[in-house]
Image (cartoon, rainbow, N blue to C red):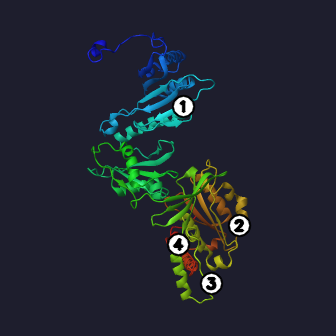
């Protein structure tokens, strides 16, 4: 080494000594640089090995000045990180871990890259203080990025492990397509909170060309719960229709601020390029796609915590038809809309006054004035958000006479749509108590002879589902089922007498009559579906 550096670095000294018992005086250096020595020595967690590492790190602390730094280049294997962070944090040093940027990150290679990221441990020596020392843990994942403060050594280890897993995933995605369902969260660099959720969708059937390798699809806020964006099969359909070999869908998280499509594109461009497929030409522009060209609208109206369901949020979002919807979301399952109401269009004060004036001209003075609801608060009561709710309403056609619904509403119809809070069961709707034999007998006792009991059943356990259907038929001999396409939901229509059985044409005719009864002048109606269409696939169990 002396000969190699004699001309270029004549002042540099090369010394050989025991790293666990160095010959330098105390506080001799401002920096100690370790390029892989800790990784090489700490090969296992045997007592002898750990004692040797303790002596080595103690010597590092001895020869460094206060304010000096121990800079250690490492692959940050779990036991190495645990030992280094544990040792220096107990000594009261500031602990920071940097992920080292690689020049390979700036280019797309066809050859497999080294999948494990390299880290630099930067341990800063503080002057010993009285009492317990303040522990500082930081992680910096970008070369010019701001360090993120973490609350504990365990949390730092978790964050480093996430970076390692991400690097492994990048390596796999770069080398191979069709890995199945791949999703990941990109977090805010300052808070560590999830900011974007990415789903990687490959379409092997798409014929490759220069311009169809890779694209990014930004899901407008509030629409991530839709089947096309929120379900794996929906995303596959979206990718196939987009015509790219690899499509990454990006969902925006509630609680985060977004300035617009351009700022999102600037923020994500470098990150998503790391997930590009192998063989994509360098310097190729990656298109950003969306619906309508904007990022959508989401306004949180209320958020709190329920003792039964945990954290929840009530938010207003804009749908694909530019209408607004108010939704209840349980954050334990943030991609599922628990309940939804459609908001009627807001009316300006000037337009309201003009409508009032026009109505007064068109009707007698003694007629009551039809005042509009308060702006932003009026609810479209005819709207049904779920296919299984529409099917349940369509099942009212089994009453034979729509007048039963209007003249004799008491116990002609009983509906259950209740979810279970026990995730260990194979049935998430309804809870088992609602299909217990004694309970069903009580339902039967309050149902009129010509009435209908309607139940939403969500059961993935086939054995359990057969048991539920058998129990229902023991109480309600006539049982219809309407399965919801693309969902686990099945709507069961239960009646007391087999002679009430209807053929499909007669059932559809009755559904049409029911819809005519419900479509009364002056009454709201959701015209996005037809009741009789909901019953075309009904079968008798």
Rendering coords of residue 273 (x, y %): 35, 44
Whole-Å distance between the Cαs marked 1 and 4? 58 Å
Disc on the earlier residue, 3 or 2: 3
Whole-Å distance between the Cαs marked 3 and 2? 43 Å
Whole-Å distance between the Cαs marked 3 and 4? 25 Å
Disc on the earlier residue, 3 or 1: 1
Q: Secondary structure at mark 3?
A: loop
Disc on the earlier residue, 3 or 4: 3
Please give the label number shown on residue 526.
4
Whole-Å distance between the Cαs marked 3 and 1? 70 Å
**Dot in front, 3 or 1:** 1
Q: Which residue is mark 3?
A: 368
**Dot in front, 4 or 2:** 4
Rendering coords of residue 427 (x, y %): 61, 53
**Dot in front, 3 or 4:** 3
Rendering coords of residue 495 (x, y %): 64, 69
Q: Mark 4: few, some, or many residues within 10 Å (few <14, many ≥20)?
A: few
């Amino acid at each position: 080494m002396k000969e190699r550096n004699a001309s270029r670095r004549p002042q540099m000294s090369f010394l050989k000594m025991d790293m666990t018992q160095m010959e330098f005086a105390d506080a001799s250096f401002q920096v100690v640089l370790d390029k892989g020595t800790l990784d090489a020595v700490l090969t296992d967690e045997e007592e002898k090995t750990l004692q040797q590492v303790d002596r080595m790190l103690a010597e590092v602390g001895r020869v460094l000045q206060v304010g000096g730094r121990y800079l250690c280049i490492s692959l940050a294997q779990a036991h190495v990180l645990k030992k280094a962070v544990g040792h220096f944090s107990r000594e009261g040093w500031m602990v920071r871990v940097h992920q080292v940027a690689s020049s390979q990150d700036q280019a797309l290679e066809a050859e497999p890259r080294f999948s494990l990221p390299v880290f630099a441990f930067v341990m800063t020596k503080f002057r010993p203080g009285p009492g317990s020392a303040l522990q500082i843990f930081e992680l910096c994942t970008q070369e010019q990025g701001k360090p993120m403060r973490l609350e504990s050594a365990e949390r730092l280890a978790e964050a480093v492990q996430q970076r390692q897993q991400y690097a492994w995933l990048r390596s796999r995605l770069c080398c191979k397509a069709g890995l199945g369902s791949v999703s990941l969260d990109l977090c805010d660099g300052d808070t560590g909170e999830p900011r974007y959720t990415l789903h990687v969708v490959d379409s092997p059937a798409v014929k490759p060309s220069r311009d169809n390798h890779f694209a990014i699809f930004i899901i407008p806020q509030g629409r991530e719960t839709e089947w096309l964006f929120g379900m794996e099969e929906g995303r596959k359909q979206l990718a196939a229709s987009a015509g790219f070999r690899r499509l990454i869908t990006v969902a925006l998280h509630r609680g985060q601020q977004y300035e617009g499509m351009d700022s999102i594109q600037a923020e994500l461009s470098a990150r998503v390029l790391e997930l590009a497929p192998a063989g994509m030409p360098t310097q190729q522009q990656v298109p950003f796609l969306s619906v309508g060209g904007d990022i959508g609208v989401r306004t949180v109206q209320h958020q709190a915590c329920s003792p039964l369901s945990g954290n929840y949020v009530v938010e207003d979002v804009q749908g694909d038809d530019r209408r607004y919807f108010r939704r209840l979301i349980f954050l334990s399952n943030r991609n599922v809309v628990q309940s939804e109401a459609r908001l009627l269009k807001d009316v300006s004060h000037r337009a309201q006054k003009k409508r009032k004036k026009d109505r007064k001209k068109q009707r007698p003075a003694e007629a009551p004035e039809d005042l509009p609801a308060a702006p932003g608060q009026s609810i479209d009561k005819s709207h049904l958000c779920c296919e299984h709710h529409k099917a349940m309403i369509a099942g009212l056609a089994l009453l034979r006479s729509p007048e039963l619904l209007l003249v004799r509403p008491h116990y002609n119809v009983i509906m259950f749509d209740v979810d279970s809070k026990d995730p260990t069961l194979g049935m998430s709707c309804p809870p088992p108590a609602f299909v217990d034999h004694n309970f069903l007998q009580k339902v039967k006792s309050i149902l009129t002879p010509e009435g209908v009991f309607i139940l939403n059943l969500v059961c993935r356990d086939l054995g359990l589902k057969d048991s539920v259907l058998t129990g229902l038929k023991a109480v309600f001999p006539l049982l219809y089922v309407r399965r919801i396409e693309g969902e686990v939901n099945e709507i069961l229509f239960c009646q007391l007498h087999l002679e009430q059985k209807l053929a499909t044409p007669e059932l559809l005719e009755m559904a049409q009559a029911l819809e005519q009864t419900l479509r009364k002048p002056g009454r709201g109606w959701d015209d996005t579906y037809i009741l009789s269409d909901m019953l075309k696939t009904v079968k008798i169990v």
